[in-house]
Amino acid sequence: MIVERVNIENNRSWNELLNINYNIFFDYKFLNYNTIFNKGINFHHLIFKSQDKNKVLALLTGCEETNNGKKTFFSCKGASFGGFLWREKLDVIDYQIVISELKKYLRENNFYDCIINNPPSIYTIDNNEEYEYALLKEGFCIKNYSLTNIINLSDFDYNKLKNPLKRTIRNSSEIINVRIVNSNEPISYLNKFYEILYNNRSLKNIKPTHTFEELMYLKKNLDDKIIFFASEIEKFLTGICVLFLAKKDVVLNFYLATDEDFKKYRVSDFLLYYTIKWAKENNLRLYDIGTSDAKGSLIEGLYKFKRKFRAFGFIRKSFIINLKQ
């Protein structure tokens, strides 16, 4: 096994596997915004190749941090998920070999520990947990976990929703218009788009993950992978939704926010339904609405809001290993 630290900009081996098994959080066009906006991340991306055929088996996004003289390999800051991106048709034996080589590489490079943030296992096409099994067998343990709500779009049907939600959707459809927003919209409109997001998050005493400039940069560089939706009532902008096409068949709802002045119109319900329907019509497999907990506690109202759209809970796990033991 060959393990190489690489600069992923225009790296042929990296992009060949990424084209086969796309993941937005492995895309240089996405990760580079951290460098453009001076996030101070020391990236440490790795490629794993078979020594005999020089065939790429896996990619691993990563960065390194030093605290109290101890180096941590983290996969990965600046993205929702990290972990391995695997070549298709590998099995648990392959996974264990690659993970073993990762541990060897990190020890040789004086890392104290390693933290890997994985997407939910359902993101994989074959929907198995062999990769996570391999992590556990190789000495990793679960550091923390959170619950995210995901819709299997093949099972999603308006008629399966409960009657109160269906009534809300019907009533909202008569007054709310939803459209896709392009990056070449007037700057005043895009500012208003972001303002709704910022004000919505301010009510919860938090800030959006991205500044206006960062979000617009990502949209312009990944225009077909990041989709903006806006809801309007009589030309008033009432809500926004930002979807990330995380994989070729998986969409992640990164932002959903509404203007409080239009709360009585149930804008968030209709906007979420509209984007779910859009994803299904575009032949996607999964719609991830995002996590329903914070700081280890379930946010019951948020969970129930997502659950009524038949978005069932799946676990995002963070794994850790102490390399000095």
Image (spheres, helix red, strand yellow):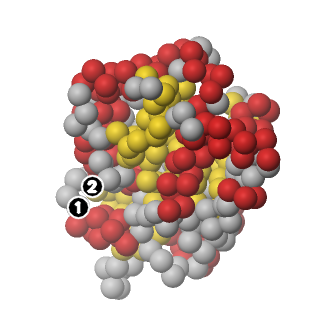
Kindly give the residue lying farthest to the front in the view shown: 174
**What amino acid is at disc 2?**
Ile
Q: Position of residue 325 (x, y in %)?
A: 64, 50
Bin the neighbour count of mark 2 within 10 Å (Cα to Cα): few under 14, some 14-19, many 20 and up: many
Residue matched to label 2: 8
- Specify the label residue 11 is tagged with: 1
Q: Nearer the viewer, residue 119 or 59?
A: 119
Q: Specify whether 273 is left or right of 208.
A: right
| Residue that appears at 62% across and 22% down | 263
Q: Specify whether 306 is left or right of 10.
A: right
Observer able to see residue 208 = no
Q: Quadrant of the N terminus?
A: bottom left
| Residue that appears at 40% across and 63% down | 22
Q: Position of residue 133 (x, y in %)?
A: 69, 66
- Specify the label residue 256 is tagged with: none
Mark 1 and mark 2 in contact? Answer it, CB < 8 Å: yes
Q: Nearer the viewer, residue 237 or 280?
A: 237
Task: Report which quarter residue 51 is drawn in.
Answer: bottom left
Q: Specify whether 20 is left or right of 295.
A: left
| Residue that appears at 77% across and 31% down | 301
Instruction: Classify mark 2: helix, strand or loop.
Output: loop
Q: Is residue 114 above or below residue 263?
A: below
Task: Report which quarter residue 50 is drawn in.
Answer: bottom left
Q: Position of residue 16 (x, y in %)?
A: 29, 70
Instruction: Classify mark 1: helix, strand or loop.
Output: loop
Q: CA distance from mark 1 to mark 2?
A: 5 Å
